[in-house]
Amino acid sequence: MMIFLLEAAANTGKAAAKTTEIKDSGKLIWDQLAGWYNSFIAHLPNIGIALLVLIIAYFVSRYVDKGIQKLLQSKVSQASVRRLAGKAVAILVVLGGIFIAMSVLQLNDVVQGIIAGAGISGLVIGLALQGSMSNVISGIILSFRKQVKVGDWIETSDFSGEVMEIQLDKFILKQADNNIVIFPNKTI
């Protein structure tokens, strides 16, 4: 009987210890959540400014894209080259907006880490996407060639037809019987 009472007392002590541990871990979690909430409230003006910068950068990039295309309209006859130049400048505007927003949020260390890792990441991604990148580079070259432009009738890769569109990754051709043929750029 005495052993049974000792075991019951030991089990009661373990249960009380577990209850205390649960209360302590619950308090730690609550304190962490409260700290995050207070930090969020303290940085709320910066978050608002960063979101405003991102929204402005997005809309400015759209206008810059259209402006670059209009500016190049009289100088460059190929629409695909104008689109490519407009998109490239628009991407730079958005990236600038992202870096400004990160600076407003005082994430300067993160920005430095991103810039440092961009070179290595670019190399790894370039090797991984070798096939896709060859299509993109071929698309850029096709966009700048004056011999091939939208509306021309061409024969290539056992197909002939009118060039409908030259994109970065594909070449769209409309045959005489109205069939649409899509080629990867690296095959042309």
Image: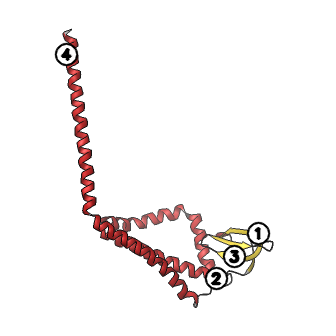
The Cα atoms of the two marked residues, 1 and 3, are separated by: 11 Å
Q: Compared to 39, does 58 lie above or below? A: below
Q: Which residue is mark 1?
A: 179
**Residue 7 x %, y %:** 22, 17
From where the camera sits, is residue 105 visible? Answer: no
> Which of the 4 image quadrants contains residue 24?
top left
The Cα atoms of the two marked residues, 2 and 4, are separated by: 92 Å
Q: Which residue is mark 2?
A: 145
**Residue 156 x %, y %:** 74, 74
Pick whichever, 71 or 132, lies toward us: 71
Q: Are marks 4 and 3 in contact (CB under 8 Å)?
A: no
> Which of the 4 image quadrants contains residue 120?
bottom left
Q: Earlier in the sequence, mark 2 or mark 1?
A: 2
The Cα atoms of the two marked residues, 2 and 1, are separated by: 25 Å
Disc 1 marks a residue whose amino acid type is: Asn
Name the disc covering residue 6, or none.
Answer: 4
> Which of the 4 image quadrants contains residue 118?
bottom left
Q: Earlier in the sequence, mark 2 or mark 4?
A: 4
From where the camera sits, is residue 22 visible? Answer: yes
Q: Earlier in the sequence, mark 2 or mark 3?
A: 2
Q: Earlier in the sequence, mark 4 or mark 3?
A: 4
Mark 3 nearby-residue class (10 Å; few <14, some 14–19, many ≥20): some
Disc 4 marks a residue whose amino acid type is: Leu
